[in-house]
Structure formats: structure tokens, C-alpha cells
Amino acid sequence: MGILRNVLVFPSKLKEVKKQVKVQRDFIHKNLHPILSKYHHQNDGSLSAFDFDKITNYYGIGSPVLAGEGISGFLNKTISDSERKSLTFMAAITGLFDDFFDRSNQSLERIKGLMTLNEDIIASNSHEKLFQDLVKSILQTVKDKKRVQEYAEKVFLAQVESLKQKEKSLSWDELFYITYQKGGESLLFYRCSFDDEISPEEEKCLFKIGGLVQICNDVFDVSKDLKEGVRTILTEAHDIQIVHSKIDQLQKDTFGFCKSKFPGKNMDVLLEQIKFIVSQSLVALNFYQTTQNNNGKNFTPQKYPREALICDMGKKLNLLRAGFYWITK
């Protein structure tokens, strides 16, 4: 009955997501592009074209649409303009914040100072200035500034922990835990864009969902992570089938837990949005499985060319496969 229902609702759900994407693109054009335009013209080179693309497309669209619209459905409300603004700006700083840890030699003290708007820490380039401008806008927009700052601190600590992913001593399970923790804290940070109070039960559910999302996101970053020397459950996997089974089980456990805490259609709205992320990661894993099968017994991404690690989700066949997983999982 579940699969039959999914077959019937998938076309309308897909149409709804496409509409949500358009709404978010229009919002970005009106509210975020004017800020970015200044930095396009005054860029000192610390912001790349890829940085702007992540802000306006990857994070700027994906997080508000899949996470934000999902959470609003769970809360049984429409996202207000102020909530959408703070959510969009939170999404926009995600990549910039990651880069402080991944691509720069910043001290942790300086990164935290930039994040907390410490007056003793002066932004020294376009990257840092844009980051702080967006943080200021978030704090001016949200209802509960203290809550945002508390969850931002948790994201910072999770990012600090993720620095260990460059160490060779960590086990596969430890890498999984670090990634999962970072995702959980990040989704709860996004949740702070909504005015509504967060109950302990909702917090537990969102933490689990965020962990699942982060694990799925890492599936697409194998080539980038290898280049940057970051160890993940994908770069250290010897058999893609093990990762596939792990994510399958994680989705079942996460969805089961959340439905047990919040039975009803509101939680279903959130989980159906998240399924779009999970289903695409499963398509990518199948792509890697083919790569593994064509190159020997074990998955050894360090030996593969870049094109063997890039799953193009723009291809129609891959989109159809993702739809199949959305319906059947």
C-alpha cells in the first residue's frame, strides 16, 4: 500500500518541489543578489565563482527547499518572509563557513571570532566580510538571537571535530559519527530560522534527520574530499554495498523513529522532502558500485579518474532512478 500511495503522490510532490524551487530562486534574486552584487564588483579574489554558485544554487536552493519547506510542513505553516530570509542567509553562509576550516589556515579562535562578530576580530578579505554581513543580517532577522547563537556554537564545535577527518588514525565508524554529528547540529541551526519553539522530541528527530542528510551529502563529495585530503565513509569504503546498506538502514531507523514520535501527515511532509536527498544519494552509490565492479573487487577511489567519481544528477536517466528510489524507499 505504501508503494502504491507513493506512485500516486510522486507526480504532485515533484511538481510542488519545482514550484518551491522557483519561489526560492525569485527570493534569492530579490533579497540576496543585491548583497552579492557588491562583492562581485569589490571581490579581492578570496571569493571564487564556485563560492557564488554554492551560495545562490547549491546551498541557497537546496537547504531552504528541501529542509526549510519540509520543516514548515512539519510545523503546519507557511514560511514567512522573515523566516525565509534568515533561512536563505543561513544556507548562504554554510559554504563560506566550511571553507574557513577546509581551505584556509585560520586559527580556531579567529574563525569563532568571525562567527560571533567579535569586535576584536576584523574581517580581512571579501570572503570574511561577506560572511559577517550575512551573519549580521541573520541576527537582525530572527526572533530568538540567543537560540541562533547557541546552535551556531554547536555547529562550530562539530566543525572543529570534523578537522580530525584529515587524521589517518580514525576508524570508519568514527568518521561516520563525526559526519552524522555535524549534520544533526547543522539542521538544528537551520531550524532556528523559524519563530516556533523547538520541543525536545522535535530536536531529537531533526538531529537524526540532519545526520542522515549529511551522510547522503558526503556521497557526492568523494572527488573533492580526496583532493582536499578529507577522509569520509566514502573515501575509506572498500565496498560500496556496505555503504549502501548502511544508508538504507539509517533511513529506515530515522524515519521509523520520527514517525513514532510524530505520527501523522505533518511529519510525512518533512520526510518526503528528505527522501529527495536520500534517493539521489542512492543513485550516486549505484554509480560508484558500477565503477567498483568495472575496476576490481574493492572500491579504491584514490585510483579512479575524476569522471569515475562524478555522478551527474542532471541526466534524465539518473533523475528517473532517483524517482524510483523515492517511490520504493
Image (spheres, grey):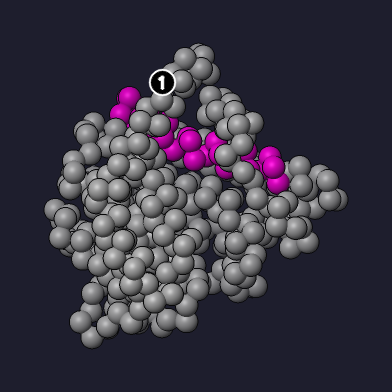
Query: Residue at position x 44%, y 50% from top?
Result: 58
Q: Position of residue 176 (x, y in %)?
A: 56, 57
Q: Residues within 10 Å of mark 1 (few under 14, many from 20)?
A: few
Query: Residue at position x 25%, y 73% from top?
Result: 116
Q: Main secondary structure of the magenta part?
A: helix
Tell me if residue 322 can be seen: yes
Out of 264 and 133, give the one closest to the viewer.
133
Relative to 21, is 137 on the left or the right?
left
Residues rendered magenta in the picture: 261-288
Can you tell which quarter of the image residue 149 is in? Answer: bottom left
Whether residue 220 is situated above or below residue 78 in the rendered picture: below
Out of 179 and 70, give the one closest to the viewer.
70
Query: Residue at position x 85%, y 50% from top?
Result: 296
Q: Is residue 314 located in the magenta-colored stretch of the structure?
A: no
Residue most extreme to the front: 41
Out of 30 and 68, give the one closest to the viewer.
30
Whether residue 45 is situated above or below residue 285 in the rendered picture: below
Q: Is residue 273 located in the magenta-colored stretch of the structure?
A: yes
Q: Position of residue 25 (x, y in %)?
A: 34, 43
Describe the element under mark 1 as helix, strand or loop.
helix
Name the image quarter holding the C terminus: top right
Q: Which residue is mark 1?
A: 12
Relative to 81, is 179 on the left or the right?
right
Residue most extreme to the bottom: 120
Query: Residue at position x 39%, y 67% from top?
Result: 97
Whether residue 70 is situated above or below residue 163 in the rendered picture: above
Q: Position of residue 147 (x, y in %)?
A: 21, 58
Out of 195 and 291, give the one closest to the viewer.
291
Q: Position of residue 320 (x, y in %)?
A: 59, 28
- Amino acid of disc 1: Ser
